Amino acid sequence: MRLAAAALAFLWPEAALAQNISTPALITLSAAPAGVYASTDQPNTFNHALNCVVSFSSVAGGYVVTTIQGHDLGTGKYYNIAGTPAMTGGTMMLTLIPGGGPASPLGGISANAYLPQTWRAVMQVLGSTSTSATGSIGCSAMN
């Protein structure tokens, strides 16, 4: 197996870089008021799929919607790829995979999409002025 991987890396050097990548928490909210919170742009060179775990320990007086967005380099605009329904707490998996796939065991969402070259996570905390949310999102990009 190692010999095959070494041969592949020699013949196609980029293949050696094609690894699954897990991010630290992209967004962490701690009693965050209503608003829009976006991660920094995440570069992607070789991966096609993405698994994200969205988790909230507390959402008071409102709800949170989390989306994965792609970034169009030509226009500079962001576009939605997949998102969670309104969450008032708990944990959900958000998956992007070419060809789609089954819903995750966490009661999540599976979208038939490729992971674009540049992407980000966005959390929208929605509600009144007294709304607050505590939670995070972390992702793993996969070949």
Image (cartoon, rainbow, N blue to C red):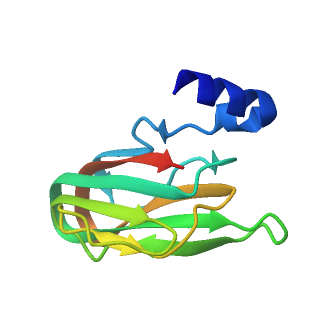
**Picture residue at 18% right of the left edge, 62% below the top:** 105
Q: Nearer the viewer, residue 37 or 105?
A: 105
Q: Is residue 126 above or below residue 44?
A: below
**Picture residue at 56% right of the left edge, 56% below the top:** 120
Res. 34 visible in picture: no
Instruction: Give the x, y percent position of residue 98.
Output: 52, 69
Res. 112 visible in picture: yes
Q: Is residue 38 above or below residue 2?
A: below
* Side of 103 relative to 111 (left or right): left
Instruction: Give the x, y percent position of residue 29.
Output: 33, 47
Q: Is residue 43 above or below residue 35?
A: above
Image-quadrant location for residue 127: bottom left
Instruction: Give the x, y percent position of residue 50.
Output: 46, 56
Image-quadrant location for residue 34: bottom left
Q: Is residue 142 above or below residue 23?
A: below
**Picture residue at 32% right of the left edge, 57% below the top:** 33
**Picture residue at 65% right of the left edge, 61% below the top:** 116
